[in-house]
Amino acid sequence: MRSPHHHSPRNGDATPPPHHHHHRQYQSTVSVQKLRRFNWLILLLRLAAFCFALASSIFTVTNSRGPSSPHWYDFEALRYVFAANAMVALYSLSESGASVWEILKNATLFPEAFQLWFDFSHDQVFAYILMSAVSAGTALARTLKGSDTCTVSSAFCIQSDIAIALGFAAFLFLAFSSLLSGFRVVCFLINGSRFPH
Amino acid sequence: MRSPHHHSPRNGDATPPPHHHHHRQYQSTVSVQKLRRFNWLILLLRLAAFCFALASSIFTVTNSRGPSSPHWYDFEALRYVFAANAMVALYSLSESGASVWEILKNATLFPEAFQLWFDFSHDQVFAYILMSAVSAGTALARTLKGSDTCTVSSAFCIQSDIAIALGFAAFLFLAFSSLLSGFRVVCFLINGSRFPH
Protein backbone atom coordinates (compact mmCIF):
# COMPACT_ATOMS: atom_id res chain seq x y z
CA MET A 1 0.00 0.00 0.00
CA ARG A 2 1.47 3.28 -1.10
CA SER A 3 0.42 6.64 0.07
CA PRO A 4 1.06 10.10 -1.38
CA HIS A 5 3.43 10.76 1.54
CA HIS A 6 6.04 8.78 -0.39
CA HIS A 7 6.21 11.60 -2.90
CA SER A 8 7.00 14.41 -0.50
CA PRO A 9 10.74 13.84 0.08
CA ARG A 10 11.35 13.06 -3.59
CA ASN A 11 9.60 16.25 -4.63
CA GLY A 12 11.85 18.22 -2.31
CA ASP A 13 14.96 16.71 -3.96
CA ALA A 14 13.71 17.08 -7.50
CA THR A 15 12.59 20.74 -7.57
CA PRO A 16 13.68 22.97 -9.17
CA PRO A 17 14.74 20.70 -12.04
CA PRO A 18 17.58 22.06 -14.20
CA HIS A 19 15.91 21.35 -17.53
CA HIS A 20 12.44 22.38 -16.39
CA HIS A 21 10.93 19.57 -18.41
CA HIS A 22 7.18 20.00 -18.60
CA HIS A 23 6.20 16.35 -18.20
CA ARG A 24 8.49 15.74 -15.23
CA GLN A 25 7.51 18.96 -13.49
CA TYR A 26 3.84 18.13 -13.87
CA GLN A 27 4.38 14.71 -12.39
CA SER A 28 6.43 15.78 -9.38
CA THR A 29 4.71 18.89 -8.06
CA VAL A 30 1.06 18.50 -8.93
CA SER A 31 0.61 14.83 -8.11
CA VAL A 32 -0.29 15.16 -4.42
CA GLN A 33 -2.87 17.84 -5.09
CA LYS A 34 -4.13 15.86 -8.11
CA LEU A 35 -4.52 12.73 -5.98
CA ARG A 36 -6.62 14.65 -3.49
CA ARG A 37 -8.88 16.18 -6.16
CA PHE A 38 -9.18 12.85 -7.95
CA ASN A 39 -10.37 11.12 -4.75
CA TRP A 40 -12.89 13.85 -4.06
CA LEU A 41 -14.21 13.66 -7.62
CA ILE A 42 -14.65 9.89 -7.31
CA LEU A 43 -16.46 10.32 -3.99
CA LEU A 44 -18.83 12.90 -5.51
CA LEU A 45 -19.58 10.64 -8.49
CA ARG A 46 -20.25 7.68 -6.18
CA LEU A 47 -22.62 9.72 -4.03
CA ALA A 48 -24.44 11.08 -7.08
CA ALA A 49 -24.80 7.58 -8.54
CA PHE A 50 -26.09 6.36 -5.15
CA CYS A 51 -28.71 9.13 -4.90
CA PHE A 52 -30.05 8.67 -8.42
CA ALA A 53 -30.07 4.87 -8.25
CA LEU A 54 -31.84 4.94 -4.87
CA ALA A 55 -34.40 7.45 -6.15
CA SER A 56 -34.97 5.34 -9.25
CA SER A 57 -35.53 2.14 -7.28
CA ILE A 58 -37.92 3.91 -4.88
CA PHE A 59 -39.89 5.38 -7.79
CA THR A 60 -40.11 1.91 -9.35
CA VAL A 61 -41.19 0.11 -6.17
CA THR A 62 -43.87 2.63 -5.19
CA ASN A 63 -45.39 2.48 -8.69
CA SER A 64 -48.82 1.00 -7.94
CA ARG A 65 -52.06 2.71 -7.03
CA GLY A 66 -54.46 0.20 -5.54
CA PRO A 67 -55.86 -3.00 -7.06
CA SER A 68 -57.44 -1.32 -10.13
CA SER A 69 -54.14 0.19 -11.32
CA PRO A 70 -51.35 -1.87 -12.96
CA HIS A 71 -48.61 -3.06 -10.60
CA TRP A 72 -44.90 -2.61 -11.32
CA TYR A 73 -44.16 -6.22 -10.37
CA ASP A 74 -46.25 -7.50 -13.30
CA PHE A 75 -43.77 -6.05 -15.78
CA GLU A 76 -40.53 -7.97 -16.25
CA ALA A 77 -38.63 -4.89 -17.47
CA LEU A 78 -39.62 -2.83 -14.40
CA ARG A 79 -38.45 -5.65 -12.12
CA TYR A 80 -35.14 -5.52 -13.99
CA VAL A 81 -34.96 -1.72 -13.58
CA PHE A 82 -35.58 -2.08 -9.84
CA ALA A 83 -33.04 -4.88 -9.37
CA ALA A 84 -30.32 -3.06 -11.32
CA ASN A 85 -30.88 0.24 -9.52
CA ALA A 86 -31.01 -1.38 -6.08
CA MET A 87 -27.74 -3.20 -6.78
CA VAL A 88 -26.08 -0.04 -8.04
CA ALA A 89 -27.34 1.93 -5.02
CA LEU A 90 -25.87 -0.63 -2.58
CA TYR A 91 -22.61 -0.84 -4.52
CA SER A 92 -22.24 2.95 -4.79
CA LEU A 93 -22.90 3.37 -1.08
CA SER A 94 -20.22 0.85 -0.11
CA GLU A 95 -17.80 2.35 -2.64
CA SER A 96 -18.48 5.80 -1.16
CA GLY A 97 -17.49 4.38 2.21
CA ALA A 98 -14.26 2.98 0.73
CA SER A 99 -13.63 6.34 -0.91
CA VAL A 100 -14.08 8.25 2.34
CA TRP A 101 -11.68 5.80 4.00
CA GLU A 102 -9.14 6.44 1.25
CA ILE A 103 -9.43 10.22 1.64
CA LEU A 104 -9.07 10.04 5.43
CA LYS A 105 -6.31 7.40 5.67
CA ASN A 106 -4.46 8.03 2.37
CA ALA A 107 -4.56 4.28 1.68
CA THR A 108 -7.07 1.97 0.08
CA LEU A 109 -9.42 -0.04 2.31
CA PHE A 110 -8.32 -3.41 0.85
CA PRO A 111 -4.87 -4.17 -0.60
CA GLU A 112 -4.34 -1.73 -3.44
CA ALA A 113 -4.28 -4.16 -6.40
CA PHE A 114 -7.43 -5.93 -5.22
CA GLN A 115 -9.27 -2.68 -4.51
CA LEU A 116 -8.44 -1.13 -7.89
CA TRP A 117 -9.40 -4.18 -9.93
CA PHE A 118 -12.54 -4.71 -7.84
CA ASP A 119 -13.65 -1.10 -8.35
CA PHE A 120 -12.96 -1.06 -12.06
CA SER A 121 -14.51 -4.42 -12.93
CA HIS A 122 -17.63 -3.74 -10.88
CA ASP A 123 -17.99 -0.23 -12.29
CA GLN A 124 -17.82 -1.63 -15.81
CA VAL A 125 -20.23 -4.49 -15.22
CA PHE A 126 -22.75 -2.42 -13.26
CA ALA A 127 -22.64 0.39 -15.82
CA TYR A 128 -23.48 -2.07 -18.60
CA ILE A 129 -26.19 -3.73 -16.49
CA LEU A 130 -27.75 -0.38 -15.63
CA MET A 131 -27.67 0.73 -19.28
CA SER A 132 -29.28 -2.58 -20.19
CA ALA A 133 -32.02 -2.21 -17.55
CA VAL A 134 -32.77 1.38 -18.54
CA SER A 135 -33.03 0.40 -22.22
CA ALA A 136 -35.29 -2.56 -21.48
CA GLY A 137 -37.43 -0.26 -19.32
CA THR A 138 -37.60 2.30 -22.12
CA ALA A 139 -38.62 -0.36 -24.63
CA LEU A 140 -41.41 -1.43 -22.25
CA ALA A 141 -42.49 2.15 -21.60
CA ARG A 142 -42.76 2.82 -25.34
CA THR A 143 -44.75 -0.37 -25.85
CA LEU A 144 -47.09 0.59 -22.99
CA LYS A 145 -47.67 4.03 -24.56
CA GLY A 146 -49.44 2.30 -27.46
CA SER A 147 -51.46 -0.07 -25.25
CA ASP A 148 -54.47 0.38 -22.96
CA THR A 149 -52.38 0.48 -19.78
CA CYS A 150 -51.38 4.12 -20.21
CA THR A 151 -54.87 5.35 -21.12
CA VAL A 152 -56.33 3.63 -18.03
CA SER A 153 -53.63 4.80 -15.62
CA SER A 154 -51.44 7.56 -17.02
CA ALA A 155 -49.84 8.15 -13.60
CA PHE A 156 -48.33 4.66 -13.75
CA CYS A 157 -46.65 5.41 -17.09
CA ILE A 158 -45.40 8.81 -15.96
CA GLN A 159 -43.89 7.37 -12.80
CA SER A 160 -42.21 4.60 -14.83
CA ASP A 161 -40.73 7.23 -17.15
CA ILE A 162 -39.36 9.17 -14.18
CA ALA A 163 -37.85 6.03 -12.65
CA ILE A 164 -36.16 5.18 -15.96
CA ALA A 165 -34.82 8.72 -16.37
CA LEU A 166 -33.37 8.64 -12.83
CA GLY A 167 -31.77 5.29 -13.61
CA PHE A 168 -30.20 6.80 -16.71
CA ALA A 169 -28.72 9.63 -14.64
CA ALA A 170 -27.28 7.04 -12.24
CA PHE A 171 -25.79 5.26 -15.26
CA LEU A 172 -24.05 8.45 -16.43
CA PHE A 173 -22.35 8.97 -13.07
CA LEU A 174 -21.40 5.30 -12.84
CA ALA A 175 -19.98 5.28 -16.38
CA PHE A 176 -17.87 8.35 -15.58
CA SER A 177 -16.56 6.83 -12.36
CA SER A 178 -15.71 3.66 -14.30
CA LEU A 179 -13.49 5.82 -16.53
CA LEU A 180 -11.70 7.19 -13.46
CA SER A 181 -11.25 3.78 -11.83
CA GLY A 182 -9.99 2.44 -15.18
CA PHE A 183 -7.41 5.23 -15.16
CA ARG A 184 -6.33 4.18 -11.66
CA VAL A 185 -5.95 0.54 -12.72
CA VAL A 186 -3.76 1.37 -15.74
CA CYS A 187 -1.66 3.75 -13.62
CA PHE A 188 -1.19 0.93 -11.16
CA LEU A 189 -0.20 -1.51 -13.93
CA ILE A 190 2.35 0.91 -15.41
CA ASN A 191 3.75 2.68 -12.36
CA GLY A 192 2.94 0.33 -9.51
CA SER A 193 0.92 3.10 -7.91
CA ARG A 194 -2.50 4.64 -8.32
CA PHE A 195 -1.11 7.88 -9.74
CA PRO A 196 1.69 9.11 -11.96
CA HIS A 197 4.81 10.05 -10.02
CA MET B 1 4.05 9.74 -33.82
CA ARG B 2 6.22 7.23 -32.07
CA SER B 3 7.03 3.78 -33.28
CA PRO B 4 8.47 0.77 -31.49
CA HIS B 5 11.72 1.34 -33.43
CA HIS B 6 12.51 4.02 -30.85
CA HIS B 7 13.03 1.34 -28.28
CA SER B 8 15.58 -0.74 -30.16
CA PRO B 9 18.74 1.34 -29.55
CA ARG B 10 17.76 1.96 -25.93
CA ASN B 11 17.24 -1.74 -25.33
CA GLY B 12 20.70 -2.40 -26.73
CA ASP B 13 22.20 0.05 -24.23
CA ALA B 14 20.17 -1.10 -21.29
CA THR B 15 20.62 -4.89 -21.39
CA PRO B 16 21.97 -6.58 -19.38
CA PRO B 17 21.06 -4.22 -16.52
CA PRO B 18 23.32 -4.49 -13.46
CA HIS B 19 20.51 -4.72 -10.92
CA HIS B 20 18.30 -6.93 -13.04
CA HIS B 21 15.21 -5.12 -11.81
CA HIS B 22 12.10 -7.02 -12.81
CA HIS B 23 9.91 -4.07 -13.71
CA ARG B 24 12.56 -2.33 -15.80
CA GLN B 25 13.60 -5.50 -17.55
CA TYR B 26 10.02 -6.32 -18.43
CA GLN B 27 9.50 -2.87 -19.83
CA SER B 28 12.64 -2.75 -21.95
CA THR B 29 12.85 -6.19 -23.55
CA VAL B 30 9.27 -7.35 -23.92
CA SER B 31 7.70 -4.10 -25.08
CA VAL B 32 8.29 -4.48 -28.83
CA GLN B 33 6.89 -8.00 -28.88
CA LYS B 34 4.05 -6.91 -26.62
CA LEU B 35 3.19 -4.03 -28.93
CA ARG B 36 2.97 -6.40 -31.87
CA ARG B 37 0.74 -8.89 -30.03
CA PHE B 38 -1.42 -6.07 -28.66
CA ASN B 39 -2.03 -4.73 -32.17
CA TRP B 40 -2.90 -8.17 -33.49
CA LEU B 41 -5.31 -8.75 -30.61
CA ILE B 42 -7.05 -5.44 -31.31
CA LEU B 43 -7.32 -6.30 -35.01
CA LEU B 44 -8.85 -9.69 -34.20
CA LEU B 45 -11.38 -8.13 -31.82
CA ARG B 46 -12.33 -5.50 -34.42
CA LEU B 47 -12.84 -8.13 -37.09
CA ALA B 48 -14.90 -10.32 -34.75
CA ALA B 49 -17.07 -7.34 -33.75
CA PHE B 50 -17.48 -6.48 -37.44
CA CYS B 51 -18.57 -10.01 -38.39
CA PHE B 52 -21.09 -10.36 -35.57
CA ALA B 53 -22.54 -6.86 -36.01
CA LEU B 54 -22.87 -7.39 -39.77
CA ALA B 55 -24.53 -10.77 -39.26
CA SER B 56 -26.89 -9.29 -36.69
CA SER B 57 -27.95 -6.41 -38.95
CA ILE B 58 -28.48 -8.79 -41.90
CA PHE B 59 -30.58 -11.11 -39.72
CA THR B 60 -32.65 -8.13 -38.58
CA VAL B 61 -33.20 -6.66 -42.07
CA THR B 62 -34.18 -9.95 -43.71
CA ASN B 63 -36.72 -10.65 -40.95
CA SER B 64 -39.99 -10.54 -42.92
CA ARG B 65 -41.79 -13.31 -44.76
CA GLY B 66 -44.35 -11.85 -47.14
CA PRO B 67 -47.28 -9.55 -46.41
CA SER B 68 -49.04 -11.92 -43.96
CA SER B 69 -46.04 -12.10 -41.60
CA PRO B 70 -45.00 -9.26 -39.26
CA HIS B 71 -42.31 -6.95 -40.65
CA TRP B 72 -39.19 -5.97 -38.66
CA TYR B 73 -39.63 -2.30 -39.58
CA ASP B 74 -42.93 -2.12 -37.64
CA PHE B 75 -41.08 -2.67 -34.35
CA GLU B 76 -39.20 0.30 -32.96
CA ALA B 77 -36.78 -1.87 -30.96
CA LEU B 78 -35.79 -3.94 -34.01
CA ARG B 79 -35.11 -0.73 -35.97
CA TYR B 80 -32.86 0.30 -33.07
CA VAL B 81 -31.09 -3.08 -33.13
CA PHE B 82 -30.50 -2.74 -36.86
CA ALA B 83 -29.24 0.85 -36.64
CA ALA B 84 -26.86 0.10 -33.77
CA ASN B 85 -25.44 -3.02 -35.41
CA ALA B 86 -25.02 -1.34 -38.79
CA MET B 87 -23.17 1.56 -37.15
CA VAL B 88 -20.94 -0.80 -35.19
CA ALA B 89 -20.22 -2.88 -38.31
CA LEU B 90 -19.15 0.20 -40.28
CA TYR B 91 -17.10 1.52 -37.37
CA SER B 92 -15.39 -1.83 -36.72
CA LEU B 93 -14.53 -2.20 -40.41
CA SER B 94 -12.88 1.22 -40.59
CA GLU B 95 -11.08 0.59 -37.29
CA SER B 96 -9.82 -2.73 -38.65
CA GLY B 97 -8.38 -0.80 -41.57
CA ALA B 98 -6.68 1.63 -39.20
CA SER B 99 -5.37 -1.34 -37.19
CA VAL B 100 -3.91 -3.04 -40.29
CA TRP B 101 -2.25 0.28 -41.20
CA GLU B 102 -0.76 0.48 -37.70
CA ILE B 103 0.61 -3.08 -37.91
CA LEU B 104 2.13 -2.50 -41.37
CA LYS B 105 3.55 1.01 -40.84
CA ASN B 106 4.25 0.91 -37.08
CA ALA B 107 2.48 4.25 -36.73
CA THR B 108 -1.11 5.31 -36.21
CA LEU B 109 -3.15 6.39 -39.26
CA PHE B 110 -4.01 9.80 -37.76
CA PRO B 111 -1.85 11.75 -35.27
CA GLU B 112 -1.41 9.50 -32.25
CA ALA B 113 -3.30 11.55 -29.63
CA PHE B 114 -6.28 12.05 -31.92
CA GLN B 115 -6.36 8.41 -32.99
CA LEU B 116 -6.20 7.04 -29.43
CA TRP B 117 -8.89 9.34 -28.06
CA PHE B 118 -11.07 8.75 -31.12
CA ASP B 119 -10.81 4.97 -30.76
CA PHE B 120 -11.46 4.94 -27.04
CA SER B 121 -14.40 7.37 -26.99
CA HIS B 122 -16.10 5.67 -29.93
CA ASP B 123 -15.52 2.21 -28.48
CA GLN B 124 -17.12 3.31 -25.21
CA VAL B 125 -20.10 5.05 -26.80
CA PHE B 126 -20.78 2.31 -29.34
CA ALA B 127 -20.47 -0.42 -26.69
CA TYR B 128 -23.10 1.33 -24.55
CA ILE B 129 -25.34 1.95 -27.56
CA LEU B 130 -25.09 -1.67 -28.66
CA MET B 131 -25.83 -2.91 -25.14
CA SER B 132 -28.81 -0.57 -25.04
CA ALA B 133 -30.11 -1.77 -28.43
CA VAL B 134 -29.70 -5.43 -27.52
CA SER B 135 -31.56 -4.90 -24.22
CA ALA B 136 -34.39 -3.01 -25.89
CA GLY B 137 -34.60 -5.79 -28.48
CA THR B 138 -34.69 -8.42 -25.72
CA ALA B 139 -37.47 -6.54 -23.91
CA LEU B 140 -39.47 -6.46 -27.17
CA ALA B 141 -38.79 -10.13 -27.90
CA ARG B 142 -40.03 -11.13 -24.44
CA THR B 143 -43.15 -8.99 -24.84
CA LEU B 144 -43.80 -10.58 -28.26
CA LYS B 145 -43.50 -14.08 -26.74
CA GLY B 146 -46.66 -13.39 -24.75
CA SER B 147 -48.58 -11.83 -27.66
CA ASP B 148 -50.21 -13.24 -30.80
CA THR B 149 -47.27 -12.32 -33.07
CA CYS B 150 -45.16 -15.30 -32.08
CA THR B 151 -47.97 -17.84 -32.32
CA VAL B 152 -48.84 -16.61 -35.84
CA SER B 153 -45.25 -16.47 -37.08
CA SER B 154 -42.79 -18.25 -34.83
CA ALA B 155 -40.02 -17.95 -37.47
CA PHE B 156 -40.14 -14.16 -37.05
CA CYS B 157 -39.55 -14.43 -33.30
CA ILE B 158 -36.76 -16.99 -33.68
CA GLN B 159 -34.95 -14.86 -36.24
CA SER B 160 -35.29 -11.81 -33.96
CA ASP B 161 -33.78 -13.81 -31.10
CA ILE B 162 -30.84 -14.85 -33.28
CA ALA B 163 -30.24 -11.27 -34.44
CA ILE B 164 -30.25 -10.07 -30.82
CA ALA B 165 -27.86 -12.82 -29.72
CA LEU B 166 -25.45 -11.95 -32.56
CA GLY B 167 -25.65 -8.30 -31.52
CA PHE B 168 -24.78 -9.30 -27.97
CA ALA B 169 -21.70 -11.18 -29.21
CA ALA B 170 -20.65 -8.07 -31.16
CA PHE B 171 -21.10 -6.07 -27.94
CA LEU B 172 -18.77 -8.41 -26.03
CA PHE B 173 -15.96 -7.99 -28.57
CA LEU B 174 -16.50 -4.24 -28.73
CA ALA B 175 -16.48 -3.93 -24.93
CA PHE B 176 -13.21 -5.87 -24.75
CA SER B 177 -11.59 -3.73 -27.42
CA SER B 178 -12.75 -0.63 -25.53
CA LEU B 179 -10.75 -1.92 -22.53
CA LEU B 180 -7.65 -2.26 -24.71
CA SER B 181 -8.05 1.16 -26.33
CA GLY B 182 -8.62 2.63 -22.85
CA PHE B 183 -5.31 1.08 -21.80
CA ARG B 184 -3.61 2.71 -24.79
CA VAL B 185 -5.07 6.13 -23.91
CA VAL B 186 -3.89 6.01 -20.29
CA CYS B 187 -0.44 4.78 -21.41
CA PHE B 188 -0.31 7.74 -23.75
CA LEU B 189 -1.34 10.15 -20.99
CA ILE B 190 1.28 8.82 -18.56
CA ASN B 191 4.20 7.94 -20.84
CA GLY B 192 3.56 10.00 -23.96
CA SER B 193 3.41 6.77 -25.96
CA ARG B 194 0.96 4.00 -26.62
CA PHE B 195 2.93 1.48 -24.60
CA PRO B 196 5.06 1.29 -21.46
CA HIS B 197 8.75 1.82 -22.18
Image (cartoon, coloured by chain):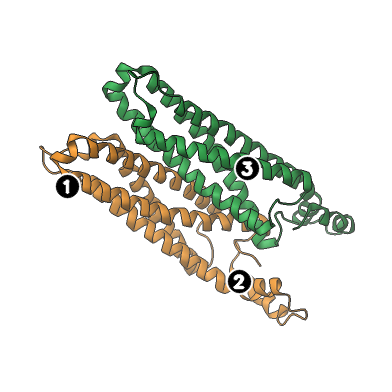
Chain colours: A green, B orange
Chain at numbered mark 1? B
Q: Determine the secondary structure under disc 2.
A: helix
Chain at numbered mark 2? B
Residue A43 location, x and y as percent? 67, 39
Mark 3 neighbour class, 10 Å CA radius: few under 14, some 14 to 19, many 20 or more: some
Which numbered circle lies on residue A84?
none
Q: Determine the secondary structure under disc 3.
A: helix
Of tags 2 and 1, the one toward the viewer is 1
Is A1 positioned to the left or the right of A148 in the image? right
Q: Quadrant of the C terminus of chain A?
A: bottom right
Give the residue number, with chain letter if any, for mark 1: B155
Amino acid at the residue labelled 2: Ser
| Marked residue nearer the N-terminal end (2 or 1) | 2
Is B142 positioned to the left or the right of B187 in the image? left
Residue A19 location, x and y as percent? 83, 59
Dots 2 and 1 on the same chain: yes
For the residues bearing labels 1 and 3, Cβ distance under 8 angstroms: no
Residue B188 location, x and y as percent? 62, 57
Residue A181 location, x and y as percent? 62, 49
Amino acid at the residue labelled 1: Ala
Dots 1 and 3 on the same chain: no
Which residue is pictured at 36% across the width and 17% down the height?
A154
Which is nearer the eye, B175 or B109?
Answer: B175
Q: Is residue B46 above or below residue B74?
A: below
Give the residue number, with chain letter if any, for mark 2: B31
Distance from the alpha carbon under mark 2 to that under mark 1? 51 Å
Dots 2 and 3 on the same chain: no
Amino acid at the residue labelled 3: Ser
